[in-house]
Amino acid sequence: MKKFVNLLPPEEQKQLKLQELNRELLSFAFWLGLSFLVFIALLYAGRVFLRSELAATTQQVAAETAALTDLQEAGLPAEVEKFNLNLANFRTLTAKHETLAPVLLELAELLPPDLTLSSLSLDRKSRKVEIAGRAGSRKSVLILRRNLLTSPSFSNVNFPLANLEKATDLPFSYRFYLKPSSPSQ
């Protein structure tokens, strides 16, 4: 760094130093004021941004509240309650039908190949089973009767004589009961 030699009289040197100090003080005040103005501008911009965010959030909350109110007024809770009730009923029915599955499987195994069921009715309380359908031959109707009589799951097999009226392609119907030892409940 270079040193400057000041040959001015001491009074002027003092004035020069005061002017230099004054210039530095004015420069400092200018930069301080400018910094303060930038800080104020940033605070104002932040305030404007936060107000706009608050307004947007308030609008979004109002929209979501309105949508929720619409859903509540539209009966959504009632629909959910109805769905839950239907689901509970479905589960109950499914559980009850599963217990009859072995009986239905055994009945399916007892049917001769050329025999077709058109209706099946099961009464849980009386344990009565009624079936009806078409058979390819009289022999198939008699085989089904024999299979039902020898089955460990069925008893009291009703044998209407109308089942033997035709020799081929004949309608048939049987009524029988589940034995107490077979699963039905």
Image: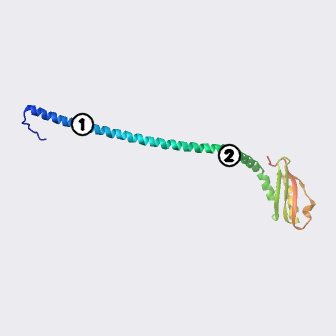
User: In x, y percent, where is residue 133?
Assistant: 84, 61
User: In x, y percent, where is residue 159?
Assistant: 91, 58
Q: Which mark is nearer the camera, 2 or 1?
A: 1
User: Looking at the image, is 101 positioned above or below residue 33?
Assistant: below
- Left or right, 93 with respect to 165, comes to left
Q: Residue at x 80, y 55 (%)?
A: 106
User: In x, y percent, where is residue 48?
Assistant: 41, 41
User: Is any part of residue 111 visible from this angle?
Assistant: no
Q: Residues within 10 Å of mark 1 (few under 14, many from 20)?
A: few
Which residue position holds label 1? 28
- Left or right, 38 with respect to 11, comes to right
Q: Which secondary structure lies at badge 1?
A: helix
Q: Residue at x 60, y 43 (%)?
A: 68
The outermost residue toward the bottom is: 168
Q: Are marks 2 and 1 in contact (CB under 8 Å)?
A: no
Nearer to the camera, 156 or 50:
50
Nearer to the camera, 102 or 21:
21
Question: Picture quarter containing residue 145?
Answer: bottom right
Identify the coloring. Answer: rainbow
The N terminus lies in quadrant = top left
Mark 2 vs mark 1, CA separation in Å:
73 Å
Q: Which mark is residue 79?
A: 2
Question: Picture quarter containing residue 131?
Answer: bottom right
Q: How many marks?
A: 2
Which amino acid type is marked by label 2? Glu
Among numbered discs 2 and 1, the one appearing first in the sequence: 1
User: Is any part of residue 160 visible from this angle?
Assistant: yes
Q: Which secondary structure lies at badge 2?
A: helix
Q: Residue at x 21, y 35 (%)?
A: 25
User: In x, y percent, where is residue 58?
Assistant: 51, 41
Which amino acid type is marked by label 1? Phe
Question: Picture quarter containing residue 137?
Answer: bottom right
